[in-house]
Amino acid sequence: MFDKILRVGTRDSPLALWQAHKVLGLLKAAQLKTQLIATKSAGDLNLTQPIYAMGIQGVFTKTLDIALLENRIDLAVHSLKDVPTQLPEGLVLAAVLERGSASDVLVQTHKADLEQASTIATGSLRRKAQWLHRYPHHHLVNLRGNVQTRMDKLFSSNWEGAIFAKAGLERAELLGSHFQELDWMIPAPAQGAIGIVCRIDDSELIEELQKINHQPTQICVDIERGFLRILEGGCSAPIGAHAVVAQNNIQFKGGVFSLDGQTAATTFKEVEISDGENLAAKAAKEVLAKGGDQIMKTIESSKP
């Protein structure tokens, strides 16, 4: 019997703690003992710069990666969309919980006509690019901080709205009724999913974590993260990817957008689950052929 007390690492934001407690509950149900260890990340400490301007991948995960590698924690709980597709050597994504909503939503301060000039807030390049693709006459402003902080900033501003992940608002009990679900916006890869990372040599723990792994979600996020990895976007390019299991098939949509939203290269594919292993590569190849390669080159050349 596995009787070690597992040191569970998490960021200390309210949403991160909610996710960590969700994992703690599942581990307890699996008869595993736990201890919660919370910390701040670089992304939590720097709330002024947009994430894409901070110059590093994994701004929300690096602190916990180091804690794992230094054996100060045994596993780390993350919003999986924050986890780089290339983990540090010695670490592995060991389990994924059943995903919540993957959708983005627009929260509005008042009933505004979006066909008119509007100011919309987001700290995400992906959301900004897709919004400008649909509403090129809008003005986008940067918005950073935890979910509550961003919501407070929105309702103390003169903006028409701000874009959030629906799952984050639901988990923080902040969704309310003043929102529009953006079913046309392609989510971030693994948005709405909670991932658990541990040391790759901790084989006994990895085996235990399979008890709480949700296989359909894992299949989908592996495809989404594979698509992102091939396009090499990380946090620095507007890339969306979303896969869902529909009966015996996987439906996938993905795309890359220019920073100003004027250009887009997207794809939609549906294959049998048994053919899902190559789906990310096929979708990425198609997006690159449709002009995604030029979009990525332009983004790369624009970096300082």
Image (cartoon, rainbow, N blue to C red):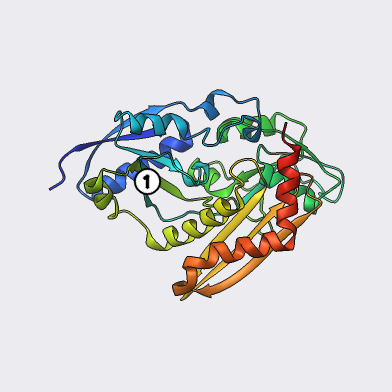
Residue 229 visible in the snapshot? yes
Q: Residue 139: which quarter of the image?
A: top right
Label 1 neighbour load within 10 Å: few <14, some 14-19, many 20+: some
What's the amino acid at mark 1? Answer: Val
Q: Nearer the viewer, residue 91 or 11?
A: 91
Q: Residue 123: which quarter of the image?
A: top right
Residue where numbered disc 1 is placed: 92
Q: Secondary structure at mark 1?
A: strand
Tell me which residue sits at (46%, 55%) in the image. 99
255 vs 202, left or right, is: right
Q: Position of residue 195 (x, y in %)?
A: 42, 47
Q: Position of residue 5 (x, y in %)?
A: 20, 36
Tell me which residue sits at (62%, 50%) in the image. 104
118 vs 220, left or right, is: right
Screen quadrant of the C terminus: top right
The image shows a total of numbered marks equal to: 1
